[in-house]
Amino acid sequence: MARFWIGALLLLANTSSLHAQQSERAGDERTYVRAGLLLADPASGKVERNKTIVVANGRIVEILDGARGEGNVIDLRDSFVLPGLIDSHTHITFQNGPTAELDALKKTTTDQALNGVLYARRTLEAGFTTVADLGGNPSAALALRDAIARGNFLGPRVIAAGVVGAHGGHADIHGYRPEILTQFSPPGMCSGADDCSRAVRQAVQRGADVIKIASTGGVMTNTAAGVGQQMFDGELEAIVRSAHSLGRRVVCHAHGTDGINAALRAGVDGIEHGTYLDDESLRLMKARGVYLVPTLLAGDTVRRQAQTAPWMPPNVKKKALEVGPNMISALRRAREAGVKVAFGTDSGVSEHGINAREFALMVQAGYSPLDAIRSATVWGADHNRMSDEIGAIAPGTAADLIAVKGDPLRDITELERVSFVMSAGRVAKQ
């Protein structure tokens, strides 16, 4: 009997060792992506021909000359290959439309997370391998982020924000009876500097990667409060101080000039929208290296909806017609002033999966196709402090690759027709 158990243990040990070796070999299996044209480093703008990108364990191993490799080969020699794109402003668990106001009350956290699975897949197949989710149900967004990171299903890498806003301001809810307002007010609402510090700390405690605030009113808020400053200077300063002390960036929704400049003086790390920025805004942003995330697609979307959608509330429609048309001119001024810009769409306001339409709007604002691509790769990676991980195709970075059939440096709308997507080494579209 003793010999039986010793033999069984030895067999089990040998079997476990064999399985471990097989697993290790599978993990080390290399994929060879052959690229006809390759923009590996958008910062340089250099396009190379006939290269092979070697991928293993979800990362870039090396880039070789010529069509190399055997076995697991992906042939993109008829395509233009570039890094996976980054959208620095989305709302991945919901989408605006006729039922959006009721959906916020009727859909559970589980419903919203499952919506996020659908919207995440659409976004990934559009070529966006990293997104920042800047507002919505925080539990749904955090669960979505973690499930994608575990590999439970395919979706873009999610940078999930904790939202902190003023009671009754843009980040709060409006237009319902008081009992509903009390029950459904988001968790990050605050009044006063100390209370806003608490909200930041709780957002970080719950898992937020970044803090999103709203220093001004917003277009989609159903209240006639305008788009001027809504958070006090002391509240903004307390938020930034608390977030930075916990190692979190602060990005700020801001339309009105007063709210933009107050947020910049408080030390925020990014301005979202920036519709009514002025010379002082531009000076502060350039001096402090603050990124602007312009979200032109959202402005274009709400302007069109305000002209045609019967479901849009009058308060929202009025602001949409005022704010939307000004966003391209604001970005044009930022470009001329040399302000840093990161690509962002505010998707959720617009449909998920059409994110790349933002590129053409950026070109209308005076950006070259290459600089528009940089905003969604190397500049977006820098804005999100992830340059070692994403934004370029280089040894050691995540294997996030996309391909298009035409040349996006000649026609930026080629990025609206992505034919291949690889996310962290897994093929999501081919």
Image (cartoon, rainbow, N blue to C red):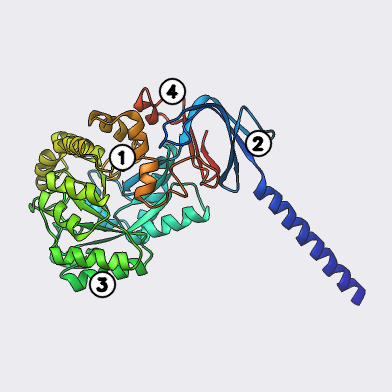
Residue 232 point in image, percent of width and height: 12, 63
Say which residue label 2 marks: 72
Under mark 1, the amino acid is Glu
Q: How far apart are marks 4 and 2 (CA)?
A: 25 Å
* Image height of 56 relative to 111, above or below: above
Q: Which of marks 1 and 4 is nearer the N terminus?
A: 1
Q: Which residue is drawn at 29% across and 55% down?
A: 135
- Marks 1 and 2, how far apart in space? 35 Å
Q: Do the residues labelled 1 and 4 touch (CB within 8 Å)?
A: no
* Circles 1 and 3 in contact, beta carbons < 8 Å: no
* Neighbours of disc 1 within 10 Å: few (<14), some (14-19), many (20+): many
Name the secondary structure under disc 4.
loop
Compared with residue 250, is residue 31 higher up or lower down, i.e. above or below?
above
Separation of disc 1 and disc 4 at Cα? 24 Å
Is residue 147 at least partly visible in the picture?
yes
Residue position for label 1: 351
Foreground label between 1 and 4? 4
The residue shown at (25%, 37%) is 297
Q: Mark 3 points at which residue?
A: 198
User: Which residue is at a point 45% across and 36% down the rendered structure image?
Assistant: 41
Q: Residue 180, can we see it?
A: no
Q: Earlier in the sequence, mark 3 or mark 4?
A: 3
Q: Which amino acid does label 4 sit on?
A: Gly
CA–CA distance in space, label 3 to label 4: 50 Å
Which labelled disc corresponds to residue 406?
4
